[in-house]
Amino acid sequence: MKENVVIIGGGIAGIEAAGQLLQLGYCPIIVEQQDHLGGHVGEWHKLFPDLTPARELVREMTGRIAGANVFLETTVSSLNRLKDGYSVVLSNGVNIVCRAILIATGFHLFDARRKEEYGYGIYNQVMTNRDLEHWFNTGTDPRIDGKDIRRIGFVHCVGSRDLKAGNSQCSKVCCITAIKQAMEMKEKFPGAEIYCFYMDLRLFGKKYEDFYIGAQKDYGVHFIRGRVSEVGETFDGRVQVKAEDTLAGKPLKVTLDLLVLMAGMVCNPRTTEIARMIHNDVDTDGFLRSRNNIYNIMDSDRPGIFLAGACTGTKTVPETVAEARAATLSIHNYLKDNA
């Protein structure tokens, strides 16, 4: 009989791990609280740097896990240590006994309403990166549909690198996502002027710098270094952004037809619940603490419990997939060594 491995989280980390475990002869069991697999990636439109359609990637990955047990709209109610493994009780009443568990609970996007000065939920023409991706996928959003969009602004680091918001970490993908979305909006509205308001551009990934250069050279995107201090609404329903251009050394005021807030990554609240169940510490950045952040990033402090993806910190898609594969090998080696 194939040995069970419980995977908590059905995003791309959980899906990739399940596929690898199947190939190694195990019985992966995915527990996902949403009604679908794919997590945040499944809700995105295109992925940088190759502009791969996100849903195609998720379909390809889920096509490799035929044979895995998947519980949707389900959470872990309790997780108890046994003499040789764990008892995992699910919200649907199912009790699973296993010797290895992978936590792949991912992240949440920062609630942009907490930054009231940016006007999300207050002014009609302010939206988030997630809202814009939804519009790319569905073509429906009252903030854009039928509007004469001539000027668009993107605010980086909303809820990231922000001590007042309680999040000092960089979300790693906001800069490149803003650039990608700016280019996509320029294609949708060729005559529009587009502005990116940033603190520092952190573009470390493969071809990310090419995106930045192309956004300026081929798409005419304006990059303004300086944190936005205030957003207000004009009499005709547009938004006015006040910022300081720190490179030019002068204040700036721009009136926009649409303002997009790049909400950053924060720890999934469900992750902290799981951490309490297994008595695993949460790190200073709010994400799960690994055994260490250099050599054992996928190991928890508890035997048989492993970590992958954004439950331990902000990650890109390639990093998340690579961690899922590495965690799978760690699980295999653990089960083999403790047979």
Image (tube, rainbow, N blue to C red):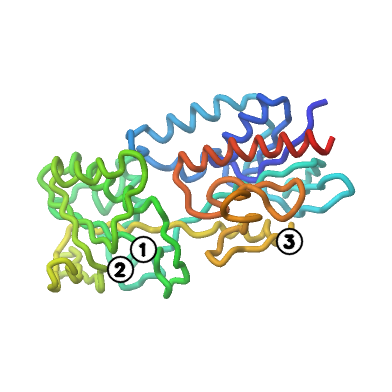
Measuring from the top left, give residue 155's x and y in whole percent: 28, 60
From mark 2 to mark 3, how far is it between C-alphas? 38 Å
The quarter of the image holding the C terminus is top right
| Residue at image mark 2 | 118
Q: Nearer the viewer, residue 91 or 192?
A: 192
| Residue at image mark 1 | 158
Amino acid of disc 3? His
Lower position in the chain sequence, tag 2 or tag 3: 2
Q: Nearer the viewer, residue 222 or 142?
A: 222
| Residue at image mark 3 | 279
Tag 2's secondary structure? helix
Tag 1's secondary structure? strand
Q: Is residue 61 left or right of residue 209?
A: right
Measuring from the top left, give residue 170's x and y in whole percent: 41, 59
Lower position in the chain sequence, tag 2 or tag 1: 2
Location of residue 169 by image quarter:
bottom left
CB within 8 Å, label 2 to label 1: yes
Q: Nearer the viewer, residue 48 or 62?
A: 48
Q: Residues within 10 Å of mark 2 (few under 14, many from 20)?
A: many
Amino acid of disc 1? Val
Q: Is residue 228 left or right of residue 312?
A: left
Measuring from the top left, give residue 319's x and y in whole percent: 49, 42
CB within 8 Å, label 3 to label 1: no
From mark 2 to mark 1, how far is it between C-alphas? 9 Å
Q: Residues within 10 Å of mark 3 (few under 14, many from 20)?
A: few
Measuring from the top left, give residue 274's x and y in whole percent: 68, 56
Viewer-side label of 2, 1: 1
From mark 3 to mark 1, how far is it between C-alphas? 31 Å
